[in-house]
Image (cartoon, rainbow, N blue to C red):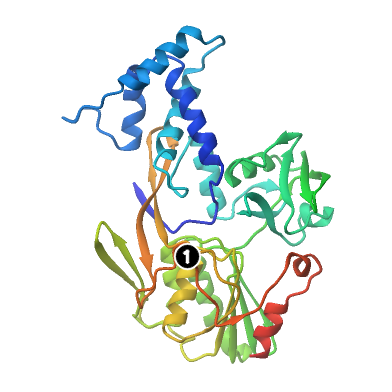
């Protein structure tokens, strides 16, 4: 079963190095590569019974040398899992990853906002470190004083600054009512916080109103985000007398392409919303027809450096068709598409399968979408409840 997914902004960053190191251990300890390979390669889509012969003798040489000298207990299951992760990490693509059954379950839940109990922060790789991008309202982290820009350094005394955001997230989540100690680095100083995990309520889309202006905030693109927004627009906008829309995609790390398509269908009627390119072939994706109730409503889209992936698809299409003014900071620049492939035993392969371009053919990968109007929002602004970007959008 394959599900198309436009990557949520969860960078593997330095974890690729960790995964490759794990691969070395996985390859060379245990029962031997030739013995464990048949258990691993089918999970990665490699047919071990094909006519292509793989020569693993170089790995066997290192394995035999290591096993002859290694002192300690060997865990066969951990060896195989480590080898799977390392094989996929060796592709050299930070968006392609293998996830164990437990990791896959947590990842899928997070995609739908069902993250259980935690402390209520959003994280991302910035300037070489995993940092707090924002704290969610009325959640433990914000109440304790954790701030945007803080570097995640330790969890329960264990250094995690070189780990991936997925790994750090899994360590921060836990049963409601349990405690977790988080150490952050702020302005070069370590700060410790002891937090009690609480159920996290983080809806994917909501709308607030400022007079006749509707402010639509989309935090991620779940499978039903577009349909939820369409219902809100249908049920409320006419009675509220909406004459202007501000679409807030800041710190939206992405989600399902189909959800971006549904959202864009409120502005675009059957138009191309993106072009996917895979193995030299181009496949356009179109907005749906008959739903573009906001096509003639003045719209401002708020973006920042954490706006990525599916949210860039939305911003890019609205910009190409002159349906909105883009305001804020240059977006993240992720113009590739991942597919989630279910593997045996509940594990998951997330693999880059295509790149995408805006309707007019612009590739934003590693470049991002430049705003029409540049307005900066600093960590200091975020931590003191100032929002110069939203203020500027309201004045347009």
Give the residue displayed 46% in from the left and 50% down from the top.
Answer: 95
Q: Identify the residue at image location x=51%, y=17%.
A: 75
Observer able to see residue 266: no
Residue 5 in percent (x, y) is at 42, 56
Q: Position of residue 169 (x, y in %)?
A: 63, 45
**Position of residue 93 measured from the top left corner of the image (x, y, whole percent):** 43, 47
Which quadrant holds the C terminus?
A: bottom right
Q: Is residue 129 left or right of residue 26?
A: right
* Residue indicated by mark 1: 310
Q: Nearer the viewer, residue 85 or 329?
A: 329
As drawn, 258 above or below 112: below
Secondary structure at numbered mark 1 = helix
Between 280 and 256, the residue placed more toward the observer is 280
Question: Looking at the image, is 112 positioned above or below residue 310?
Answer: above
Determine whether 110 is above or below 310 in the image.
above
On the question of residue 71 being in view, the answer is yes
Side of 78 relative to 284 (left or right): right
Task: Using the image, determine if residue 112 lies above or below residue 68.
Answer: below
Neighbours of disc 1 within 10 Å: few (<14), some (14-19), many (20+): many
């Amino acid at each position: 079963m394959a599900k198309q997914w436009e990557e949520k902004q969860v960078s593997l960053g330095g974890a690729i190095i960790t995964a490759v190191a794990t691969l070395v251990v996985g390859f060379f300890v245990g029962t031997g590569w030739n013995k464990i390979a048949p258990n691993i390669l089918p999970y990665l889509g490699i047919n071990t019974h094909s006519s292509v012969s793989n020569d693993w003798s170089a790995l066997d040489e290192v394995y035999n040398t290591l096993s002859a000298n290694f002192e300690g207990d060997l865990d066969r299951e951990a060896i195989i899992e480590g080898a799977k992760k390392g094989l996929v990490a060796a592709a050299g693509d930070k968006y392609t990853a293998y996830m164990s059954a437990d990791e896959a379950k947590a990842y899928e839940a997070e995609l739908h906002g069902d993250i259980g109990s935690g402390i209520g922060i959003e994280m991302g790789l910035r300037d070489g470190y995993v940092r707090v991008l924002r704290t969610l309202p009325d959640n433990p982290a914000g109440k304790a004083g954790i701030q945007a820009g803080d570097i995640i350094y330790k969890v329960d005394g264990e250094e995690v600054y070189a780990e991936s955001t997925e790994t750090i997230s899994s360590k921060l989540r836990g049963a409601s009512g349990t405690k977790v100690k988080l150490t952050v680095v702020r302005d070069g100083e370590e700060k410790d916080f002891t937090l009690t995990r609480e159920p996290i309520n983080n809806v994917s889309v909501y709308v607030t109103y400022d007079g006749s202006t509707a402010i639509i905030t989309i935090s991620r693109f779940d499978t039903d985000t577009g349909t939820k927004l369409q219902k809100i627009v249908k049920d409320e906008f006419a009675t509220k007398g909406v004459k202007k829309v501000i679409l807030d995609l800041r710190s939206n790390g992405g989600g399902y392409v189909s959800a971006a398509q549904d959202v864009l269908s409120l502005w675009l009627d059957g138009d191309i919303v993106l072009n996917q390119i895979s193995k030299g072939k181009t496949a356009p994706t179109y907005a749906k027809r008959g739903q573009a109730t906001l096509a003639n409503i003045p719209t401002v889209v708020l973006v920042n450096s954490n706006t990525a992936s599916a949210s860039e698809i939305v911003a890019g299409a609205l910009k190409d068709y002159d349906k909105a003014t883009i305001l804020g900071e240059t977006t993240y620049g992720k113009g590739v598409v991942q597919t989630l492939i279910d593997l045996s035993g509940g594990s998951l392969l997330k693999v880059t399968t295509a790149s995408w371009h805006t309707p007019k053919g612009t590739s934003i990968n590693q470049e991002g979408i430049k705003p029409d109007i540049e307005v900066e929002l600093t960590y200091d602004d975020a931590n003191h409840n100032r929002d110069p970007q939203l203020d500027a959008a309201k004045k347009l």
